[in-house]
Amino acid sequence: MKQCMDLDNLHRRIKKIIGQLNAIDRMIEEDIPCEQILMQVNASKSALHKVGHIIVEGHLENCVKQAIEDEDSDEAISDISSMLEYYSRL
């Protein structure tokens, strides 16, 4: 599955999210107002959602495309269905 993903981009984004989560933890300890903490939680959630989007996009552009080129439409449809199901849970 590594061929489906832009690994450098994903690692960079995940490290940023980890930094955001650590900052949220510090904000809670420092008794920062709830509204400010929630803004950071939302930013982290959006960043994680984008990571999911990048993974779905890579899967469609590589794995599903390959299944279509191999004329395995059942596999392609199954892949798309699974990806949509997982992504919609984010």
Image: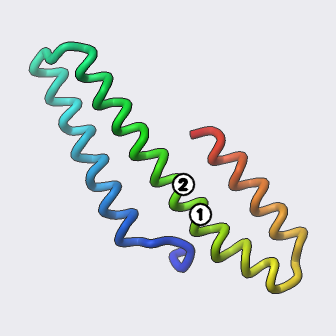
Label 2 packing within 10 angstroms: few (<14), some (14-19), many (20+): some
Residue appearing at x 48%, y 45% in the figure = 49
Residue appearing at x 56%, y 74% in the figure = 4
Helix, strand or loop at label 1? It is: helix
Label 1 packing within 10 angstroms: few (<14), some (14-19), many (20+): some
Q: Position of residue 1 (x, y in %)?
A: 57, 74
Helix, strand or loop at label 2? It is: helix
Q: Is residue 79 above or below residue 72?
A: above
Quadrant of the rendering where the C terminus is positioned: top right
Q: Position of residue 87 (x, y in %)?
A: 63, 47
Is 67 positioned to the left or the right of 14 in the image?
right
Q: Quadrant of residue 9?
A: bottom left
Residue appearing at x 57%, y 68% in the figure = 58
Q: Is residue 15 above or below residue 17?
A: below
- Amino acid, disc 1: Glu
Q: Position of residue 16 (x, y in %)?
A: 27, 51
Q: Nearer the viewer, residue 60 or 3?
A: 60
Q: Position of residue 34 (x, y in %)?
A: 25, 14
Disc 2 to disc 1, C-alpha distance? 6 Å
Q: Nearer the viewer, residue 56 or 28?
A: 56
**Number of numbered markers:** 2
- Amino acid, disc 2: His
Q: Which residue is mark 1?
A: 57
Q: Residue furthest left?
A: 30
- Residues tagged 2 and 1 counted as in contact (Cβ below 8 A): yes
- In the picture, the disc for residue 75 is none
Q: Quadrant of residue 68?
A: bottom right
Q: Which residue is mark 2?
A: 53
